Image (tube, rainbow, N blue to C red):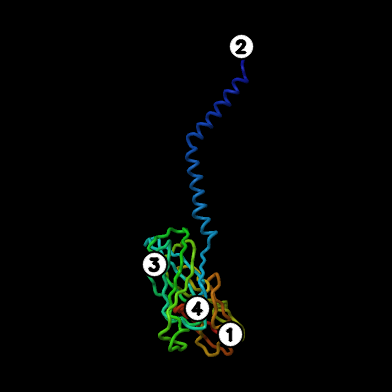
Amino acid sequence: MSIKFKGIYNLGKSSMRLQSAVDFITTYGWALLLIIAFVSFLYLFILVPSSITPASCSMVVPINCRDVIVATNTSALSTNIIILLSNSQVYPIVNPSVFINIKGVNTTPTGCNPYFVSPGGDIICTVPISEYVKINNILSGKIYLNVSNCAFAINYSSSTCKDSRIETYIGSFTGPSQPVINTKITISLSSNSNGGNINIGQPAYLYANVMLAGYPLKGAVVNFSASSQYVTINPSISTTGANGTAIVMVKASEPTTSSFTANSLDYTSGSYSINFIS
């Protein structure tokens, strides 16, 4: 007579499965931990900083900081700080230059454009730094802008000033490094006109898209002009929004073909034509 111990047999099979699971975790657990650690690193140090820390900057009055880009060229292993400023006072400023302090170290003073900045005019400064900043790493520092303020000039006019007093304006910036190839400004024009044709008396909208280092430049002042005397632009000066686009309305009183251009920060777009038909 034979006796079978089913309970003990089943218990043995369960123990084997448990032992296999323990062996698997012991063998591959380190790999799982590495994967979890890598994903956590990507999230905490790559994805999160760029999403929760947008680029920002500020200056003391009468200078406004409109935008800042931490521009890294991954091929040349170089980084530039590109700053868009504006002169909010009623007097021009001349010969702007800027240096940046990062972690207690000053960069070499760098000239900005344009040389003569009218009231309300924009200033663009591109400052190379010695530190190579990897993509999405956060960089912060202080901004020092040196200008000749025409408010204190002995001989002043609306287009020039001499013997003016040099002043320094201080600000700060922070932002994630972004990949760029160059630091050029580009301006392109487009409109909502149907194939470039619009009836006279009917408004059309003209769009100027301003890009800096391949990114939309917000807060840039754009001047629009038309080649035809029968065309009005309202307003003739507009400012780019967060998408880097400035919008104006154009209208013609007579049938005509007009070319339009847009200028910002001493850069001019190519011409764009609209046919105003009866």
Report helix, strand or loop for mark 2. loop
Counting residues from the start of the chain, the first of labels 3 and 4 encountered is 4
Q: Residue visible at 48% across and 39% down?
A: 30
Displayed quadrant of residue 168: bottom left
Badge 2: few (under 14), some or many (20 or more) residues near its Cα, within 10 Å?
few
Kind of residue at disc 4: Asn
Q: Are marks 1 and 3 in contact (CB under 8 Å)?
A: no
Residue position for label 2: 2
Counting residues from the start of the chain, the first of labels 2 and 4 encountered is 2
Q: Where does the N terminus fall, quadrant-wise?
A: top right
**Where residue 148 appears, x then y in whole percent?**
43, 80
Counting residues from the start of the chain, the first of labels 4 and 1 encountered is 4
Tag of residue 238: none
Residue position for label 3: 107
Relative height, residue 70 to residue 44 (above, below) = below
Kind of residue at disc 3: Thr
